[in-house]
Image (cartoon, grey):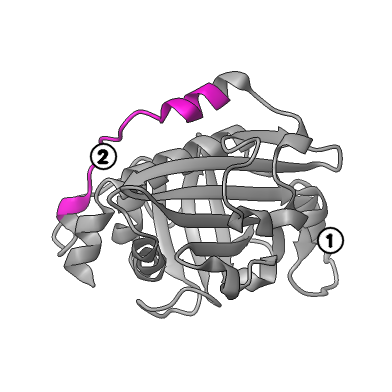
Amino acid sequence: MTGYLGYRAGDDDTAWGAFFDPHMAPLSQHVVAALHHGPQAGELLLDFACAADLLDSGYHPTEDGYARAADGSVAVAVRTDMPGVTPAMWEWWFGWHGSDARRYKLWHPRAHVSARWADGGGDGSYVGRTSLVEEYLGSALTKAAIRFVPPAELGLPPSRLGDSVAVCARLGSADLPVDIGWLVHQIRPVAGGAEMRSRFWMGGPHVQFRRPIPLPGRLIRPIAGLQLPDPRDLMVHCAQEMSHLAGFLPELHARFT
């Protein structure tokens, strides 16, 4: 591990340090209800091939939940209510937080360890860049490479986004040249603020080498043992971090834009 949890002496000596708060609100009741329900039938969660359906009005049969499919993949859905937040604030956040681990820790003070851009750059746009992060999903430390892609790559054309924002990414390992899944965070305006509808698809047909490479013997064992994140832990983590940041994102955005 190249970082550590929480803030240490001197970490709050930044312009944004006062926003670090290790106390997090309880999970939303609709997320708690989904956790009590447990795994659901795969057909009840949005299929990756239908990601563009997020841009339709209304809601899906499962806005909060997770499932394991017969092909070995898992799907996760989370909805987050965000009073006082706009989609543009999240567009700014994804380009701002990744250049300093102390910013990344604001998002989930009990699970985020470190973050940096693979290109070594600072603030700016995030699409086309890869964020290398260390974070806990449940009690498992995860080292991930999150490559942000244009929404159109997942079938979400700009012409249909309207006032909403779609943050899309390829999820992979930071230690191995392997991608394991996809994510979409759709943020759309609603009365009094915005809501985020997050979708994750991992494993099964979503696992792929980033480039054609020979397989040295030393790589075969770790790749064969590559573990997917637990979908329940991922659902809880997403619900916690999105809700936590939404609580102070308007003030943070106003101060640093």
Side (left or right) of 187 relative to 23: right
The answer to which of marks 2 and 1 sits earlier in the sequence is 2
Image location (x, y in percent) of residue 202: 70, 49
- Cα separation, mark 2 vs mark 1, equals 43 Å
Is label 1 in a helix, a strand or a loop? Answer: helix
> Height in image: 64 above or below 211?
above
Do we see residue 111 in this rendering? no
Within 10 angstroms of label 2, few (less than 14), some, or many (20 or more) residues? some
Do we see residue 167 in this rendering? yes
Residue 112 or 29: which is nearer the viewer?
29
**Mark 2 or 1, closer to the camera:** 2
Amino acid carrying mark 2 in the image: Pro
Q: Which residues are magenta?
A: 18-34
Q: Are marks 2 and 1 in contact (CB under 8 Å)?
A: no
> Height in image: 122 above or below 235?
below
The residue depicted at 57 percent of the width and 51 percent of the height is 57
Side (left or right) of 169 relative to 138: right
Question: Is 185 covered by the magenta stretch?
Answer: no
The residue depicted at 63 percent of the width and 41 percent of the height is 60
The residue depicted at 48 percent of the width and 54 percent of the height is 134
Question: Is 31 covered by the magenta stretch?
Answer: yes
Image location (x, y in percent) of residue 193: 33, 50
The residue depicted at 68 percent of the width and 44 percent of the height is 228
Residue 232 or 229: which is nearer the viewer?
232
> Residue 96, labelled with which disc?
none
Quarter of the view holding residue 128: bottom right
Is label 2 in a helix, a strand or a loop? Answer: loop
Image location (x, y in percent) of residue 92: 36, 68
> Residue 22, labelled with which disc?
2
**Which residue in the protein does label 1 denote?**
217
Side (left or right) of 99 relative to 41: left
